[in-house]
Amino acid sequence: MERMWSPWRSKYIASFKKERKRKGQNESVFSRAFKSRRDDANMIVWRSKYCFVIMNRYPYNSGHVMVVPNRQTADIADLTAAESADIMATIQQTIQALQEALNPQGFNIGANLGRVGGAGVDTHIHFHIVPRWLGDTNFMPVVADVKVVSEEIVSVLHKLRRAFSAQKSPKSKRR
């Protein structure tokens, strides 16, 4: 890959105002789902002390879920040590549940921080877990601009709930 030196770009980039954190920022779709206690309607799979697992309504693959802190924050540095530990433990539990329910061969795990980092909900940090299988990509995205998701989302939701419940972790529960 060739690189082109273009120092004038730095002035252009600096011309954009840095987004500031706002007190009382708008409530995210995740906060509304968490507070509503309508887990079926919001496709919440599991609740833990400081976070919850929710199905991605626009999945990249079957079983694409997100682990979301209960408390809304956009900044990963704002998470407390307890929240961070619970999120990581819940990610581990989620991987175990996905392995039990769907038998994937691998995973993509990550977070998109900030709007320019790809976050669709940039006011509430969340961690994606995407199960992967050999052959889960094919010609459809290239030829037809279509992603084939192989299993109905509500079916996956129920499978994951059963897998979480079978783990019998004393500190987590689904409501």
Image (cartoon, rainbow, N blue to C red):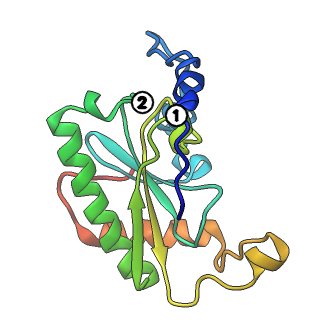
**Quadrant in which residue 27 is drawn:** top right
Q: Quadrant of residue 149?
A: bottom right
Q: Secondary structure at mark 1?
A: loop
Q: Relative to 117, say whether 134 is above or below.
A: below
User: At x 72% / y 72%, what residue is drawn?
Assistant: 147
Q: Residue at x 56, y 26 (%)?
A: 13
Looking at the image, the residue that sits furthest to the bottom is: 135
Residue at image mark 1: 122
**Which disc number belongs to residue 146?**
none
Task: Check the image and name the residue furthest to the top.
Answer: 23
The kind of residue tagged 2 is: Ala
The quarter of the displayed image where residue 104 is located: bottom left
Tag 2 secondary structure:
loop
| Residue type at numbered disc 1 | Asp
Q: Looking at the picture, how far across and down is residue 154, in whole percent?
A: 61, 66
Q: Residue furthest right?
A: 144
Real-space Cα distance between discs 2 and 1?
6 Å
For residue 11, above or below residue 139: above
Per the image, the residue denoted by label 2 is: 74
Give residue 105's position: percent from left, percent from top: 41, 86
Q: Look at the picture and state if 127 lies above or below 78.
A: below
In the image, 8: left or right of 167? right
Labels in figure, total: 2
Q: Are marks 2 and 1 in contact (CB under 8 Å)?
A: yes
